[in-house]
Amino acid sequence: MRNLMRLVALGAAGAIVLAACGGGASPSPTQAPVDTASVAPTVAPTEAAKYKACVAFDTGGLGDKGFNDLAKKGLEDAAAAGFDTAFSEAQGATDYAANIQRLIDEGCQTIVTVGFLQGQATADAAIANPDIAFAQVDATWNAAGPDFTPGTADDVPLPGNFTGLDFQIDEAAMLAGYLAAGFSKTGKIGTYGGAQFPGVTRFMDGMYAGIGYYNEQKGTSVTLLGWDGNQTGTFVGGDNPWNDPAKGEQLAKTFLDQGVDIVHPVSGATGNGTIKAMLAAGKWAIGVDTDQAISLAEYSKAILTSAEKVIDVAVLDTIKKNAGGDLGGEDFVGTLANGGVRLAPFHDLDSAISADLKAEVQALSQAIASGSVKVCNYLARGC
């Protein structure tokens, strides 16, 4: 991507025209060479002080120790760099458009929306306000329009004031799945999501693929409960899928009763309840979005690793490039190869993981980054 190089260095109206790509099928990002000397455009302090950057958070809210908090960290880093900042929080889907409009009315010059579900509201606002820079976390622009068929009348070209910030998190989650398969004592691993859409199921796909790859390499039969690598799995659903830790504890106990000793919850703060319950049972969990051994330090002894999206850096670098005059017109997709996704350190459990297993995970990471191993080849539905 033209100006999101620091991320690389770190390791419409009336139709929904934004779409996160399904797990295993990598979107076509703007390509950027890996260059550890490159950085996002430098913004002079005086320029930053004149520029207002804002974030519209998704439901689940601040304090989720994951997705929203990572985007908030990017906004806080922008404030530390001298930018004027503001934000809004959505209590439900009906808040999306109103929250974005409020930020427009407050004079925001960059508005980053968080989460796939804000696609329609973000698309409408970007098209209606071409002088304001918009970006969306967990989405790329669907230029094919509502029918998803290029070359038809409803095609909507990617506007020059939009930046898609997507993350091929199934790659990092495949590493977590392989690690879990090698670490599990029972040969049973669990996963579940808050709701069934690509931003969630990519994590689950990665777990399925990593376990499948481990079984292929080792001749074992480690199983994943909660996701079949196709379209069927366990989801919280209901009115509060992202912020119900008690439900997360309940789901953990259900998995434990089935012999599972590692669970990968993909459900915001609901999953925090699962991690708490796994700690109490003397078992383990795999975190999502951020390094949850840090964000949930009280549960760190149960967190084997986390599949991370480098959202905070993506948000900050987008604000910087917008302030430097580049309003968008591109999509960025974080991968293992460009450092946009990664596997977190093992922290308290580092000494419990064998050197051989660590080396195998590292080798798999290199194979995925090079393209010699593809997540979709290990999914039940294939590529």
Image (spheres, rainbow, N blue to C red):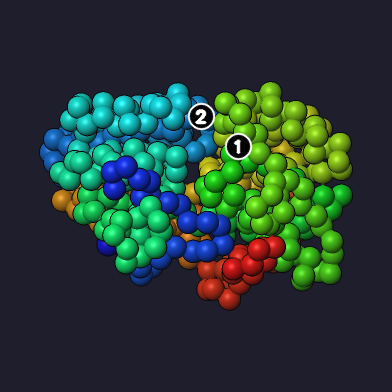
219 over 71 or under it: above or below: below
Residue for point 49% across, 38% down: 67
281 over 330 or under it: above or below: above
Q: Which mark is residue 261?
A: none
Q: Nearer the viewer, residue 282 or 234?
A: 234
**Distance in Å between CA atoms under marks 1 and 2:** 10 Å
123 over 37 or under it: above or below: above
Amino acid type of disc 1?
A: Gly
Q: Position of residue 221 (x, y in %)?
A: 84, 61
Quadrant of residue 213 within the rendered picture:
bottom right
Residue for point 82% across, 44% down: 260
The reply to whether callout 1 and callout 2 are in contact (CB within 8 Å) is yes
Q: Position of residue 101 (x, y in %)?
A: 26, 29
Q: In screen coordinates, is 292 left or right of 38?
A: right
Residue for point 45% across, 23% down: 91
**Which residue was labeled with disc 1?**
194
Q: Nearer the viewer, residue 248 or 231?
A: 231
For label 1, the SS is: loop
For label 2, the SS is: loop
Quadrant of residue 48 within the rendered picture:
top left
User: Mark 1 packing: few (<14 Cα in 10 Å), some, or many (20+)?
Assistant: many
Q: Position of residue 339 (x, y in %)?
A: 46, 59
Q: In screen coordinates, is 372 left or right of 98?
A: right
Q: Nearer the viewer, residue 263 or 94?
A: 94
Residue 141 visible, this orientation: yes
**Which residue was labeled with disc 2?**
60
Amino acid type of disc 2?
A: Gly
